[in-house]
Amino acid sequence: DSPTRGQWEASDLSESGNTQLYVPGGFAHGFQCLTDDAELNYLMSDSYHPDLARGLRWNDPDVGIPWPVPDPVLSDRDRALPLLRDIS
């Protein structure tokens, strides 16, 4: 029942920008590298537990994120994620 459910925010991060992005626990998040030689590092607040991992489809039309790369390479897991409306 969150009033911000389905809303999104985007940030460009670069090696020259010297910035970090904090995403609180419980928030959906996604990354898209814009160059072939990009490296992405991220930290988690707890150990990774695959059985607890959840997500939503990257191109969910109800969320409407205009991703810069329209046809990204995705894992089988990410390709099969549900739409936000199907997540309780």
Image: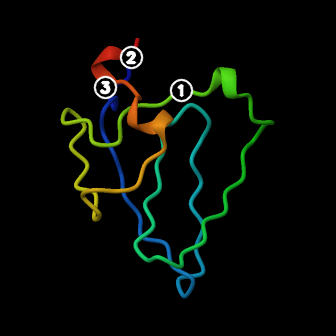
Mark 3 in CB contact with mark 2 (< 8 angstroms):
yes
Q: List the residue tagged with mark 2.
A: 87
Most foreground residue, 14 or 69: 69
Cα distance between the residues tagged 1 and 3 = 11 Å
Please indicate whether residue 48 sits to the left or right of residue 3 in the image: right
Q: List the residue tagged with mark 3.
A: 83
Residue 72 in the image: state x and y as whole percent.
35, 56
Q: Specify the farthest residue to the bottom.
A: 16
**In this view, 1 is above or below 8:** above
Please indicate whether residue 37 sits to the left or right of residue 60 in the image: right
Location of residue 42 (image quadrant): bottom right
**In this view, 78 is above or below 3:** below
Residue 62 in the image: state x and y as whole percent.
20, 32
Mark 1 or mark 3: whose residue is earlier in sequence: 1
Q: Label 3 neighbourhood size at 10 Å, few (<14), some (14-19), many (20+)?
A: some
**In this view, 2 is above or below 64:** above
Q: Label 2 neighbourhood size at 10 Å, few (<14), some (14-19), many (20+)?
A: few
Q: How is the image coloured?
A: rainbow
Disc 1 marks which amino acid? Answer: Arg
Most foreground residue, 80 or 28: 80
- Residue at 32% from the left image edge and 15% from the top image edge: 86
